[in-house]
Amino acid sequence: MERAKAIHTILVEMTTGMLVLATLATLILAWIVFFGGERHRRLKDSADAVVLFGAAIGTPMILLAILSGFRQWPLEAFLHGAIVQNKIFTALIALCFWGGFLFLRLAAGKQIWERKVLTLYALILGLGGFAFLVFTASIGGALGRKPSGFEETVRLFIETRRTFHLR
């Protein structure tokens, strides 16, 4: 049980780190595309590499973090626990956003940052994925009785433990 919790914690932290990195690089790229022009070519290339690295590692790790979470809760928690169900639900939505983001980046290549419409799509997918990652982390902090500090900020916008009740 303790080993499962440790593995889950490690996977969640690595996932969060990779996807926060990808989100920050996406924000930098969007700023360059919409306001910076061509004078930031080297920064653009570097930020694209960071986006690809963070999203390519972080996206599949969401699935690994979800699977490792199943090892630390009894079956009854998944079947009857609304908060645990909400955490799974928000994690799957984050996986969908980041999967779409990664697909878009791989399909469009580096040219994604040459077209404003594609950049806007990538920005929306990245920010949506980041938001649901924060919601999931907020729920996880409440479940583990180890709040991250995001809870009060998140609650200004949405009550993650009640909003997505699946019943």
Image (cartoon, grey):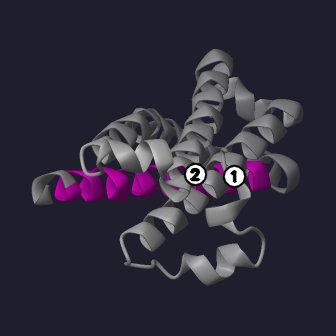
Please tell me whether mark 1 sits on a helix, a strand or a loop: loop
Front position in the image: 144 or 24 = 144
What's drawn in magenta, residue-wise?
Answer: 5-32
Can you say which quadrant of the picture contains the C terminus? top right
Q: Residue furthest top?
A: 107
Residue 126, horizontal then vertical, whole percent: 67, 45
Can you say which quadrant of the picture contains the N terminus? bottom left
Q: Residues within 10 Å of mark 2 (few under 14, many from 20)?
A: many
Q: In the displayed structure, does residue 33 sit left or right of residue 133? A: right
Q: Main secondary structure of the magenta part?
A: helix
From the viewer's perspective, is residue 126 above or below residue 155?
Answer: above
Tag 2: amino acid: Asn
Q: Residues within 10 Å of mark 1 (few under 14, many from 20)?
A: some
Query: Which residue does the image show at 71% across and 25% down from the upper left?
Result: 111
Which picture quadrant has residue 117?
Answer: top right
Q: Which residue is tagged 2? A: 86
Q: Which residue is tagged 1? A: 164
